[in-house]
Image (cartoon, helix red, strand yellow):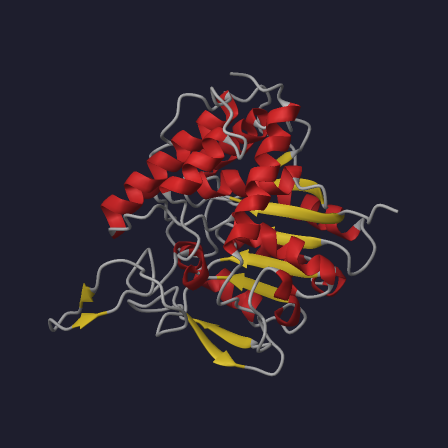
Amino acid sequence: MTPARIPIWLDCDPGHDDAFAILLAAYHESLELLGVSTVYGNAPLSKTTSNALSVLKAVGKESTFVYPGSWRPFSRHTKHAPDIHGESGLDGTDLLPQPDRKPLRYCNAIKDMRDALMSRPPHTAWLVATGSLTNIALMFAVFPEVASHLKGLSIMGGAIGDGFTDVYMGPEYTDSVGRKHTRIGNTSPFAEFNICCDPDAARSIFTNPDLTPKTTLITLDLTHQVCATAEVRDMLLFSTVKQEPPTKLRRMFYELLMFFAKTYEAVFGLKDGPPLHDPLAVAVVLASMHGSLHSLFDDAKHERWNIDVVTEGEQAGRTRASPASEGVFIPRSVELKKFWDMIEDCMAKADHATGYVQ
């Protein structure tokens, strides 16, 4: 008997790495993508919504509904990331198709997300968030019953630093009195972008006792181990069977990765390739299928953490972790080959679905 697919909802802000998260969520045989909601972040909401529609068209999943969500945080100025993702949020390729569909106008992303998740049996559905956390924090505030109904919550966001893993985050920063410090974040020296966009939303999630035991947080400490190196980019371009010439779909994703690589090198000095943050949050759901996340992510010590989000001052958006008996799981490492094999397998499925267009 074929195991039942895991229902997931993806809340995202496409975004180069979000495009790969959509690919993995849409094509992995073990996942049932219930819907996609969009949020401001890498670009304004109008652009992240259009980008989600374009990526779904490119990979042959136009039937997946896209629900525009929040255009700004709870009570702060909106942040975007044109230095990393370009003005469109998905700069770097001319192969991304224009969407045939217009964004849904008469919808409520918060309620639609709630309804889709609650339509599945208790403790079966996952919520995956790869952008700012405004949408999902609003949902849990308005519909608190969703927290106990979910099987799991997977978030790409935050950075722990202080030796949590041995990764390079970027150049050191100099404080106001001239002292140099190791960088922790990618938006400020202290904070990761998704959390920094709406730290109040993040704090509301990480202090929810119904959510923390079922939450996995994918931080920069892990994602900077998963860089799309030249070898990885070539594998995704030509496939594992060295297909010549590469398909239009593969060339599109390759060009997106090349743009992403150039901006990460220019801004952070990362020469090996850009970290592919967001699909790791989708991979968490797949790793949970065997009853443990240990099959893909390192959980040998069963470490769990309380997360405190700094909401004021120059360190606003910083995520501080302290040990807890029950709390958030923050992986320290990942099986790289298994992860890249998942991405390539879904790329091959998308190739097949779109007819191997050259």
Does residue 331 lie above or below 156 as drawn? below
Does residue 18 lie above or below 319 as drawn? above
Residue 38 found in image quarter: top right
| Residue at the (64%, 25%) spot, across then down | 352
Which residue is most to the left?
178
Does residue 67 lie above or below 175 as drawn? above
Q: Is residue 233 left or right of residue 128?
A: left
Q: Is residue 316 or residue 283 the one in the foreground?
A: 283
Which residue is most to the right?
1
| Residue at the (68%, 60%) spot, across then down | 288
| Residue 129 appearing in the image | no
Q: Is residue 205 left or right of residue 234?
A: right
Number of numbered callouts drawn: 0
Provide residue 345's location: percent of width, then percent of height: 61, 38
Provide residue 173's location: percent of width, then percent of height: 20, 64
Q: Is residue 311 left or right of residue 31?
A: left
Provide residue 328's location: percent of width, then percent of height: 57, 71
Q: Is residue 265 or residue 33 the one in the foreground?
A: 265
Does residue 220 lie above or below 6 as drawn? below
| Residue at the (11%, 71%) spot, across then down | 178
| Residue 5 appearing in the image | yes
| Residue at the (55%, 43%) spot, across then down | 21
Which residue is most to the top?
358
Provide residue 116's location: percent of width, then percent of height: 74, 46
Which residue is most to the front?
241
Residue 104 found in image quarter: top right
